[in-house]
Amino acid sequence: MNKSLSAIKTIVLYSIKMFFRDKTAIFFSLFLPLVIMSIFGVMNFGAASKVKMGIVDEAKSQATAPVVEGLKKVSNLEITENNLSIEKGELEKGNRDVVLILPKDFGKNIAQLKMGQKVAPQEIQLLYNNNKQNSTASIGTTIVNQVLDRYTHAVTQTPDIFVLKQEAISSKNLTYVDFLIPGIVALGIMQMSVIGVASVFVNWRERGILRRLLATPVKPRIILFSQVATRLIISIMQTTTILTVGVLFFGIHIAGSIPLILLLGLMGGVVFLCFGFTVSGIGNSQNTVMALANIVMMPMMFLSGVFFPRDGLPNWLQTITHYLPLTYLADALRGVIIDGSSMLAIRNDILGLLVWMVITFILAIRFFRWE
Amino acid sequence: MAKSSENIIEVKDLVKKYNGFKAVDGISFEVKRGEIFGILGPNGAGKTTTLEMIEGLRPIDSGEVHIDEFNVNNDPNKVKSVIGVQLQSSAFFDYLKLTELLEFFGSLYQRKVNPMEILKEVELEDKAKSQVKTLSGGQKQRFSIASALVNEPKVLFLDEPTTGLDPQARHHLWGLIQQIRDNGKTVVITTHYMDEAEILCDRVAIMDAGKIIKLDTPDNLVDRLIKKGFKKKKVEKAANLEDVFLDLTGKLLRES
């Protein structure tokens, strides 16, 4: 047993060495996920982006100060203050969604109002960019309305009749990157495991390397086990790299337990390694095996909610894709990383992965072959 | 157990069938300690299958093989630990240096090896830091032999080691194989080249259609044919075209 362990250690060590010298492997497993992440992360797809609001405060008085302060407190707004011509120019260039103009005589009727006189509301000008198809301008308008309303209430000291009690589902300010990164981790684990093991074994088989190894007294299961260990170790490195970049450069916050994340990574790794062993046994050449691997991976890549939530899929497709192994893995990782879910909270995903582990293990035993 | 200490390999009634077709059809022979033993025969004669059964790489349908004190049927792993194997088409991992590959193979035998010493034995010490894919054909074969020497085997199996090599590299490899034998190892070699067998082998078995049809020293086999009244159509001159080729191009190895 001790001797087997030392053999495994050496094989794993050299296999990792080979991996790090293989530039293609590095590209696909470490570099590509980071590139995808950066592209999608910078584009910040699907996120409710901030409303860019320009404020032209012509009064700069005690009356306008609370409005400006109030707006600055709204986290969905990105506020700039300039004079009218600059802000108008920016709006025309599409750099602003709305521009609020607070006139010199802003709040001219407050004094009258306080004395209990009836006053006509003062008109405030809000310019908006009507080229924009998205709803950011109207969000901006609503926010301005709300702030002005509150201001009015504050001035007239009339109480609100209704109060919207907001219950936060998640206390964090989620962006698309938060959604994306756990998906990228899951995708990376899948690709690393399926491609890694499938291409290595078919290559070794085709070139006679496996035969040469079997001509030594090493037991076949030690070779298999070493490859599994190697791939799992590399998967963990990959996961750590992606998450580290996510934390350092995209400001994601890992809410859940890191050991649980790694455990999920290992479980997913085992499922997809078994997939890899299976396809390496079904196909005869490097080309057919790679084609098979892609047939397995492509649908999952787009249907398992890696890049976009599955909510957008037709209902029947949502039902089917719910059972995909990558869906379980991505959902579980997202739960732990973003929402800080406990093991108990993601038990259904874990159960799904366990079932897939059994299925793919049986497939791997059935199809994997040395020759 | 090998009955006589003179024989290191004893093969008895060895059979391999594929779908009823007998690829190896009940062959028996012995290999003596310290000799170079050749297995000759046309393509499909069963040479490689025989070798692979002896090496424990292919299940034996019936018959027995003993190597040293071990029975291949019962103890394939013990046999594998006392033999060295160079396969007909053995490639090696990309991305590892020769020294690393030898250490890797050593670990498969649970052995610490001295890679430089082994590389020196096959004259590849100046390629120690290279990868296999950068080697020439002859260098690849020499490295393949080096990888078969990491466990200091008692028997070295070489399956068509000189196929595809230029005359310079072939002659060089012959020298290496003789040197390995002189160091006390037994060598079993298959080949298509009769000149190779004649120069290298102490004894040869000629196989055809899964059977050994003759086994003797190359000298005896030739003498017996001549005694039968065989005459070459063209009388050999004192030199042949290969001698001319080597005389013109020299014996220097052509490898970078």
Image (cartoon, coloured by chain):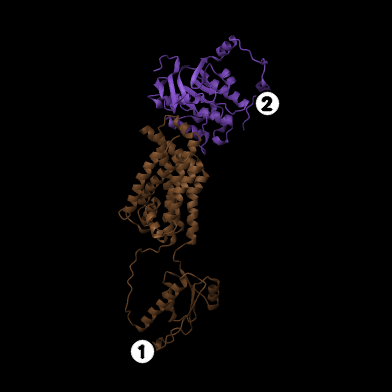
Q: Are marks 1 and 2 in contact (CB under 8 Å)?
A: no
Q: Does any portion of residue B57 appear in the rendered image?
A: no
Q: Position of residue A360 (x, y in %)?
A: 38, 44
* Hue used for the chain lettered A: brown
The residue under label 2 is B249
Mark 1 residue element: loop
* Hue used for the chain lettered B: purple
Q: Position of residue A212 (x, y in %)?
A: 47, 31
Which of these two is toward me, B121 or B53? Answer: B53
Q: Chain of mark 2?
A: B
**What amino acid is found at the position of numbered circle 1 in the picture?**
Gly
What number is the disc on residue B55?
Answer: none
Which of the 4 quarters of the picture holds residue A220? Answer: top left
Q: Position of residue A275 (x, y in %)?
A: 41, 44
Q: Position of residue A241 (x, y in %)?
A: 45, 51
Structural distance between the alpha carbons of marks 1 and 2: 117 Å
Q: Residue at x 32, y 50 (%)?
A: A351
Q: Chain of mark 1?
A: A
The residue under label 1 is A116
Q: Residue at x 56, y 11 (%)?
A: B224
Q: Does any portion of residue B229 appear in the rendered image?
A: yes
Which of these two is toward me, B42 or B162? Answer: B42
